Amino acid sequence: MTKRDKRVAVLSPIAWRTPPRQYGAWETVASNITEGLVARGWDVTLFASGDSVTRGHLHAVVDKGYEEDSAVDPKVAEYLHISEAFERAAEFDLIHSHYDFMALTYTRLVKTPVLTTIHGFSSAKIMPVYHKYRDGYFVSISDSDRAAGLNYVATVYNGIDLSLYPLQESSGDDLIFLGRIHPDKGVHLAIEVARLSGMRLIIAGIIQDQAYFQEQVKPHLDDQNIIYIGPVGVPGKNELFARARALLHLNTIPERFGLVLVEANAAGVPVIAMDLGSCREVIKDGQTGFLVANVTEAVRALGRIPEIDRRACRSRVRQYFSIDTMVEGYERVYTTIFDLEAKR
């Protein structure tokens, strides 16, 4: 069989539309995989919210993501959505799940092989599910974000559509933060770097931890030096990239992948990131940004930003983190799974 004979179901999350209008990293990746596969001749059905956009076949049981429609009960929507994909499993040669641990509980109820891309382990409390279904097929999004004992087929880095992020040839003057407003992402550390360096910081992203925002972010906001502008979509990101000297990503826990690091580098923006988790895999220290251990090192790294070649940042993204590179990786994974299943 050629890939054109294979039918793949991509199970996307439904917190947000696929692709998301603003925030939604997992939905972004599920969309990029779907569109990349379709472009390369695969027959793909995307299970996502009804307002999602795809060149594949769209199948939906909820009209909008539960984060975008308060009338939608998240758990009801999730289980209607997941069960729908697995009840139609016989129509597909492979189900590619981006739905974390919940979808795993359906995998032994169908004959169709299921591949799970693990976008991160949100809590130790979910690990019993992964341990029970450890013999399934798994892909990690970085070598650093793996759990012992799971049947990993490969690591496939997330890929982005480079056409969405044009190269910004020249450096701006601002520091920027893009991501969830949450202690894990180190917004408070970015604020400290801005204050110590005397540079303006623009913060963009959804507020995921309201208490953290009120206590450690909001008191430092003003109209001149530390500015919060809320969540932004692709146009808003590009506006920030155009005025950015560097992106600050001072994560306080090991990063799982860090899609925004790749988006910034695609636009030629250097990244200063904590050397935790996948940051070492995504950022080439001294070439596309700098890996640091604390605020002091981050401030010092700002003085080295002129050493970074913006075109080299984009070139590395094209080589390792493009949609084509990602989809080629998944094609190899699919082939491995089909071969293994044929031997059973």
Image: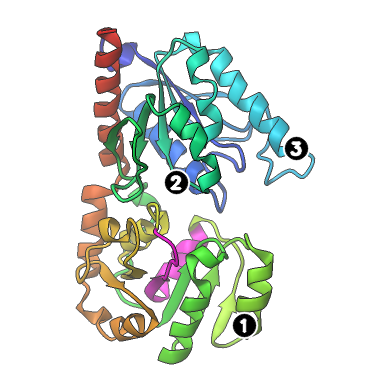
Label ID, residue 221:
1
Q: Secondary structure at mark 3?
A: loop
**Labelled pair 1, 3 in contact (Cβ < 8 Å):** no
User: Badge 2: few (under 14), some or many (20 or more) residues near its Cα, within 10 Å?
Assistant: some
Q: Mark 3 or mark 2: name the one nearer the start of the chain.
A: 3
Please state the horizontal and vertical placement of residue 282, each as a whole percent of the image.
29, 57
Q: Is residue 141 magenta?
A: no
Q: Secondary structure at mark 1?
A: loop
* Alpha carbons under labels 1 and 3: distance apart: 34 Å
Nearer the observer, disc 3 or disc 2?
Answer: 2
For residue 76, say whether it is visible: yes
Q: Is residue 157 above or below residue 293?
A: above
**Labelled pair 3, 2 in contact (Cβ < 8 Å):** no
Please tell me which residue lies in front, 267 or 147: 147
Q: Which residue is mark 3?
A: 73
- Residue drawn 37% across the image and 63% down it: 264
- Residue drawn 25% across the image and 21% down it: 335
Q: The C terminus is located in which quarter?
A: top left
Label ID, residue 283:
none
Q: Is residue 127 above or below residue 97?
A: below
Q: The N terminus is located in which quarter?
A: top left
Q: Is residue 122 above or below residue 201?
A: above
| Span colored in magenta | 235-254
Please tell me which residue lies in front, 17 or 340: 340
Please tell me which residue lies in front, 342 or 133: 133
Label ID, residue 120:
2
Please state the horizontal and vertical placement of residue 229, each as a whole percent of the image.
60, 71
Q: Mark 1 or mark 3: name the one nearer the start of the chain.
A: 3
Nearer the observer, disc 2 or disc 1?
Answer: 2
